[in-house]
Image (cartoon, coloured by chain):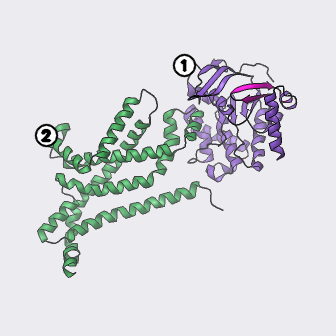
Amino acid sequence: MGQFLHEFFNPLDFLRATPQVWSGFVFNLRLMVVAEALVLVLALLVAIVRGLPGRAAMPFRGLAILYTDFFRGTPLILVLLIVEGFATLNYFGLSSGTLFLNGLIALVLVYTAYVTEVYRAGIESVHPSQRMAARSLGLSYMQTMRYVVLPQAIRRVVPPLLNDFVGLQKDTALVTIIGLVEAVAQAGQYSSDYLNDTGLMVAAVFFILLTIPLARFTDHIIRQRERRERAQVV
Amino acid sequence: MSENGNFVSMQGVRKSFDDLEVLHGIDLDVGEHEVVCLIGASGSGKSTLLRCINLLERIDEGTIVFDGQTITGTKVDVNRLRQKIGIVFQAYNLFPHMTVLQNVMLAPRKALGVSRADAEERARTLLKAIGLAEKADEFPDRLSGGQQQRVAIARALALEPKLMLLDEITSALDPQLIGEVLELVRQLADSGMTMILATHEMSFAREVANTVCFLDAGVIHEQGTPAEIFSSPREPRTREFLSRVLEAGRL
């Protein structure tokens, strides 16, 4: 037991490893913030394209489906290695010097595919009578999406969206395999330098501390909205 | 009342959903300022007929002329057309994420491009007219069914339409809430609004309609003044339908 505590939960090592792991975690933070912002916007665009009506939009719908199928079905770690492969050969302006960008591209490609499906479920959950009402008022298809369908859809998908973002935040750790020195790499470095795994626990604490407030914040938003919009139960 | 019978003119209108033909050749003329009531059992095609007029449904055959324009052709700006034809649905279909005021302002703002101030002024005037001025900043789910339906009517009126289509607008309401909605429709009729309404409220149809049409299985079997249809229907099917309605009323 003493051995176990010493190996994983040594207070001294905890304090000593914290600055080092933090220096790596800064990259995880940057990566997740930029990736989440991009994913929110791009996934919405892909979801809208996937829902476009009419025969003329068929090729675009097809491309959107192809994209989501491919990147939802491919493990992130593979996408990372593939992007790294492109970078080694300097394809698409990438290089081994653009580690952050390489990791970001892989994360965004994979998570946009997931979040597209989340948005799509939200869009489809809005009752067709809402679109009909909006169109009957002379609003165009795009205006109907913008003012009637999407606001309702996005509100509904906040919890599953958050769920995917928790996944994304944790998966920023995977970029370590293409050589970006982030929290997990720093923790591993600490382990081999001091022959003690407490650094890994420090990294775990950082990741956990990040997701908990996010979950509570979402709960808060949901409750607030319910209070405002729903009739009170008498 | 104008007897100019071609403000809305439907000729040989047919509409099928998959293999089921819902409208079997409808001919209907509605004059300006006229109120036409469509009566008939559920599934007789009343709602589909209304939805064809503002092109929420595309017809398969026939023509519809509205205000001198053939709207069933290929070069019709459906959004422009729908701005001139208001429709109110059985289930209100208010936008739940917007306040009452925002619901009424949306179409004038976005479809017509009216300025925010003008749209708000017009919306508040309308809400006052329907007696719901103090509910402007509430969300629809906090309103009673009757209030929601009145807001839906105001929302349609905000575009200053030339024609109103009312699709069984009291069918989802508790009996004690029907009166307030019908009163509003009565005022609209008195103001000269051209209206086509599908309804199960026979006494109301008798009171406000200039013309009553009895639909059965996608065909207008009989049309005439309320007195003709309700007091001395010619067709056996009309008689049968009315006696069933009467019986149901008695129970």
Q: Find residue A42 and report its horizontal and vertical position in percent.
A: 36, 42
Q: Nearer the viewer, residue B134 or B1?
A: B1
Q: Secondary structure at mark 2?
A: loop
Residue B132 in view: no
Please state the chain letter of the residue tagged with numbered disc 2 in the rendered image.
Answer: A
The answer to whether B190 is drawn above or below residue B14 in the figure is below
Q: Position of residue B181 (x, y in %)?
A: 74, 43
Which residue is disc 1 drawn over?
B74
Which structural element holds mark 1?
loop
Residue B53 percent across, percent down from the top left: 64, 27
Residues B4 and B210: in front is B210
Numbered circle sitting on residue A89: 2
| Label 1 Cα neighbours within 10 Å, binned few <14 / some 14-19 / many ≥20 | few
Mark number, residue B242 = none
Q: Which color has been applied to chain A in this rendered view? A: green
Tag 1: residue type? Answer: Thr
The residue most toward the left is: A193
Horizontal arrangement in the rendering, residue A212 relative to residue B61 (left or right): left
Q: Is residue B216 magenta?
A: yes
Q: Residue furthest bottom?
A: A2
Toward which corner of the image does residue A232 lie, by quadrant?
bottom right
**How many residues crowd around disc 2 within 10 Å: few (fewer than 14), some, or many (20 or more)?**
few
Q: Which residues are magenta?
A: B210-226
Q: Same chain for the residues at labels 1 and 2, yes or no?
A: no
Overall secondary structure of the magenta stretch? strand
Q: Colour of chain B?
A: purple
Q: Is residue A146 visible?
A: yes
> What chain does badge 1 belong to?
B
Residue at the spot x=36%, y=37% of the render?
Answer: A64
